[in-house]
Amino acid sequence: MAKRRTTARRAPKPAPVRQLGDPVLRTKADPVTVFDEALAATVELMFASMYQARGVGLAANQIGLSHALFVMDCEGVVAVVANPRITELSEEVETGPEGCLSVSGHSYPTARARRATVVGQDQTGAPIEITGEGEVARCLQHESDHVIGKVYLDRLSGDVRRRARQEVETV
């Protein structure tokens, strides 16, 4: 008897997270213009990769894709944001520990706006706006930075920046 074919899709195998020094992390991503099954598959891959690495956010360039796209699952906020743009940052700033899946094993106190709003499109192309405070705001800012070719280490200053440069050779 032949096996019956099923149409259920398997979860994608997580992609390795690119590490600091990989040029894709320092390159501005291309806008997402097509919202189709291929993008849906990319989103699935990104979530699988983020969860495998135990992160709360992941930008497409962190797995080698030059798409202006990030996913997040931070403090109950689960989202897909294509073509993200920060539209509002509070004047109130919080300095807190921040790390990055692309800078494994390191965390540094990083100043970020306490509240942030990001606009973009969801994976279907529909407009999306997310406003968050605290860790959600930090995640929105961190992932939006990745899309424009920045890493959180670029936000450091003074002694913290000097220490990071000593500890992370490719900054």
Image: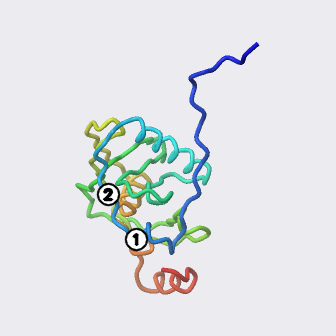
Q: Is residue 83 above or below residue 154?
A: above
Of the residues shown, which amino acid type is indicated by label 2?
A: Asp
Q: Secondary structure at mark 1?
A: helix
Q: Quadrant of the N terminus?
A: top right
Q: Which residue is mark 1?
A: 26
* Residue ID at (26%, 64%): 91
| Residue 41 x %, y % | 47, 39
Task: Judge by depth and name the residue closer to the eye, 57 or 41.
Answer: 41
Of the residues shown, which amino acid type is indicated by label 1?
A: Arg
| Residue 21 x %, y % | 51, 75
Q: Which residue is mark 2?
A: 30
Marks 2/1: CA distance? 13 Å
Q: Is residue 51 above or below residue 23?
A: above
* Residue ID at (46%, 43%): 43
Query: To which quarter of the image does residue 12 belong?
Result: top right
Question: In the image as oriented, which residue stretches furthest toward the right?
Answer: 1
- Mark 2, mark 1: which one is toward the viewer? 2
| Residue 3 x %, y % | 71, 18
Task: Count all numbered tags in the image, as a single digit.
Answer: 2
Q: Residues within 10 Å of mark 2 (few under 14, many from 20)?
A: some
